[in-house]
Image (spheres, helix red, strand yellow):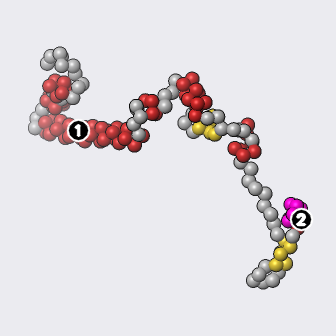
Amino acid sequence: MSYDKMKETECRCKPCNETMKRNITMPARTANKWGDCGITSGYYNKGLGCVVRNETHADEIAKSRGLVRFQEAFDGQSYDTVTDTYMDTDCHDHIQHNKDTVEVRNKMDAGADLGEAFAEVFSVERMKSDGILKEDVGG
């Protein structure tokens, strides 16, 4: 049946028995189906912000921009593993910072000035053990 004939076909409403005209809607046009917006093949890569033909093309664009794929940067580790590791480290650093802040305040409450409190909390030995200072630094 042609589109024109389908468009004009009448039908009856079952509950009220009224005559109705059947409406046929147009299918939606999408960029990746009909070639709109210059996209005829490939897909939009959000990370690169452009259309790429395939993964090889994406790699070429990334390399030209000085970017490295996640898998290459983190030697095959999963995204979840890497983010969990960084989050654990950040949480540990935050907890230690809070402990250090309390310790500095306690030393100041005990009569030390700000410089003395920091020198006691952040001693040379501690900074060496935290890897902030090299082992050959004296103090």
Residue under pointer 2: 5
Q: Position of residue 48 (x, y in %)?
A: 57, 33
Q: Secondary structure at mark 1?
A: helix
The front one of 23 and 112 is 23
Count of residue discs: 2
What label sits on residue 133 in the rendered view? none
Q: Is residue 41 visible?
A: yes
Asked if the stretch drawn in magenta spans residue 26, the answer is no
The amino acid pointed to by label 2 is: Lys
What label sits on residue 96 in the rendered view? 1
Q: Secondary structure at mark 2?
A: helix
Residue at image location 13% in from the left, 36% down from the top: 107
Residue at image location 20% in from the left, 40% down from the top: 99
> Quick one: which residue is furthest to the left in this view?
110
The front one of 75 and 90 is 75
Q: In the shown orientation, is residue 76 left or right of residue 53?
A: left
Q: Quadrant of residue 32?
A: top right
Is label 2 or label 1 in front? 2
- Among numbered discs 2 and 1, the one appearing first in the sequence: 2
> Quick one: which residue is furthest to the bottom in this view?
16
- Magenta highlight range: 1-7
Q: Are the residues at dot 2 and dot 1 in contact (C-beta closer than 8 Å)?
A: no
Q: Position of residue 127 (x, y in %)?
A: 19, 26
The amino acid pointed to by label 1 is: Gln
Q: Position of residue 41 (x, y in %)?
A: 69, 38
Q: In the shown orientation, is residue 82 left or right of residue 97?
A: right
Q: In the shown orientation, is residue 127 left or right of residue 23?
A: left
